[in-house]
Image (cartoon, grey):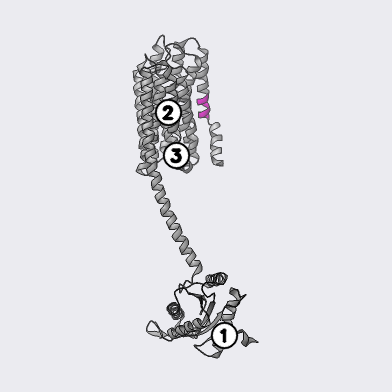
Amino acid sequence: MSQHRSVLRTARRDPVMIGAVLWTLAGCVALFALSGRSNAQVQAFWFFQPPLDALLALSSWQVARRATGALRRFWLVMTFVGALVAVGDTVQLVTALAGQNQWSTAGGPVQTICFTVAVAALIIAMLAHPMPGRTRREQVAFWLDSATVLVGGAVVAWCFAVGPDDVLNTMVTGAVILTSGFAAVKLVLSGNAPMHKAVAVPLLASAVVNAIGVFVSPGADGPMPAHVYAIRFLPSLLIAMGPRLQELLARFDEKAAFGARRQKSYSLLPYGSIAVAFTAVLTVIPEGPHARLWGAVTGLGLIFALVVCRQLAAFHDNRRLIDQLDATLADLREHEARLRHQAQSDGLTGLANRTCFHEEVAAALATPTGSGLTTVMIIDLDGFKAVNDTLGHAAGDALLAGVADRLRVSVRTGDLVARLGGDEFAVLLRDCGTAGASQTADRILLELASPIPYEDTVVRANASIGIASAEPGDDAGSLLRSADLAMYAAKHAGKGSWKCYNPAALL
C-alpha cells in the first residue's frame, strides 16, 4: 500500500501528467473565452483533442511493452484505439477549421468511422480478456449482467440524449453510452481486470463525465453553453491519464501493476439499470404514446427478461454451492470423527486410550444402568519386556496387537477395552458384578494361552488381572486404583492369575 502511495505521489510530479492537465485547462479556458462564438468553440474543442489522444496511444504502447499474454493483447488494442481516435480527431480538426456556423460536437464521417471501429475493438478486447477460475455458468451470468447494463444505457440514451433530427449524433451518443456502461461493468465485475484498480478510477470517472456531457444539453439543435463543451472535452484527459498511470505503476512494480484481484461474487449494477430505465419510462410517460415511450418500454422489458435469466443462473449457482457446502460439511464431519477417534484411541491397537477409558468409567458411575454395578479390570502382561529385548520392538508391537484382538473377542458387546499404555490394558464391564467379571477374566486368560504368530515364530502373552467393582462413593480414580491393587496382588500370587479387590484384606 505504501508503494502505491509513492507511485501516486510520483504521478502528481510526473511532467507528462502535469502537461496533460495544463493542456486541458488551457482548452477549457479557450472554450469559455469563446462563449457566444459557437463555430470557434467547436474549432477549439477539436484543436485540443489530438495531443491527448496521442498520449493515450503512447502510454498504452509503453504498458504493452512491459506486459505479457492476455494483458499485452489488451494494451495493444488500447494502443490501436488511441492511434485510431487520434487519426479521426485530427481529420475532424482539419474539417472544423474549414467549417462555418458549427455548434455540434458530433464528428464527421471519418471521425465517426474511426471512433466506431475503436469502440468495437475495445469491446472485443474486453470480451476476449480471460476470466480465470470462472465456470461457464458464471461467465454467462457475467454476460447477462453486462447486457443488462448496456440495455439500460440504451434506454436512457433513447429517452434523453437522442436528437430527433441528428441521426449521426444519435449513433455516436449511443456508442459512447453503451461503451462507458460496458467498461464500468467489466472493471467492476471482473476479478482479472487488465489494469490496476487505481487506473480504473480515472477511466470510470471519464464514463461518468461523458454521460453528464451528453445529458446536460439533450436534443440541442443550436449553440450550447461553454460549460457543455468543457464537460464533453474533459473525458479525453481522464481516458489518457489511466494508461499513463498504469505505465508509471508498471515501471515501479510490474507484479503489483498486473496482479489479479479477487473477483466480486455479485453486482448491483443490473438492479441499478432497472431503476434507471424505469425512471426514464416514468419521465416520458406524460408525453403520451410515441416512439420514445415504446422504445423505452421495450428496453425495460428486455432488461427484466435479462434479469430473470440472470436469476435463473444464480439459482443454479446457489444449488451448486449448496451441494458443495453439503459435501464440505460431510467431509468436515468425517474429518472431525477421524480426529475424535484419533484423540480417543490407541494408534497401535485401535483400542480406547487412557483418557477415553477414564471418561467412560466416570460416565458409567454417573449414570448406572441395569443392576447398577460397574466393574473394571486392569490387565498387565507378564514377560513383555523379554519379548522386546529378544525379538525386537516389532515383535512387541505384534504381541500387543494380538493381545488387543484376544481381549476384544473375550468381552461382551457393551464392554469397553482400552490400552492404558505400555503393556497395560483395561476393560470396563457395565452392569456386571464380581462374578461376571471373574468369568470374563477366565475367558481372557484362556484366549491368551494360545500363541500369537509373528513372522516365522510365535510369541506368547501371560497376564495378571485385577478386578474391582464400584462401591458407593467411588469415583473413576478410586475404582481404577482398586483394580490396580488387585492386579499387583495377582502378579504377586503367580503368572496368569486374576484377583478381585477385597478392601477387608487391607485391614
Q: Amino acid at mark 2?
A: Ser
Residue lying at 55% horizontally and 69% vertically, measured from the top left: 367
Of badges 1 and 2, nearer the viewer stands 1
Mark sitting earlier along the chain (2/3): 2
Q: Secondary structure at mark 3?
A: loop
Question: Quick one: 455 or 475, which is closer to the camera?
Answer: 475
Circles 1 and 2, Cβ within 8 Å, touching? The answer is no
Tell me whether circle 1 and circle 3 mark residues in contact (CB < 8 Å): no
Give the alpha-carbon distance from disc 1 to disc 2, as whole Å.
Answer: 89 Å
In x, y percent, where is residue 404?
Answer: 45, 77
- Considering every residue shown, the one lying at the far right of the view is 507
Tag 1: amino acid: Tyr
Tag 2 residue: 180
Q: CA distance from mark 1 to mark 3?
A: 71 Å
Q: Is residue 419 above or below residue 229?
A: below
Residue that carries the numbered disc 3 in the rendered image: 266
| Furthest-front residue in this view | 371
Quadrant assignment, res 174: top left
Q: In this image, 488 relative to 324: left or right?
A: right
Residue 130 seen: no
Q: Position of residue 282 (x, y in %)?
A: 44, 22
Residue marked by disc 1 = 488
Mark 2 vs 3: CB contact within 8 A: no
- Report the residue at 49% width, 70% height from top: 345
Against 266, residue 323 (above or below) is below
Give the class, few, some or many, for how many residues have Cα within 10 Å of label 2's Cα (few <14, many ≥20): many
Label 2 element class: helix
Mark positioned earlier in the residue sequence (1 or 3): 3
- Magenta segment boundaries in residue numbering: 15-21
Q: Residues within 10 Å of mark 3 (few under 14, many from 20)?
A: few
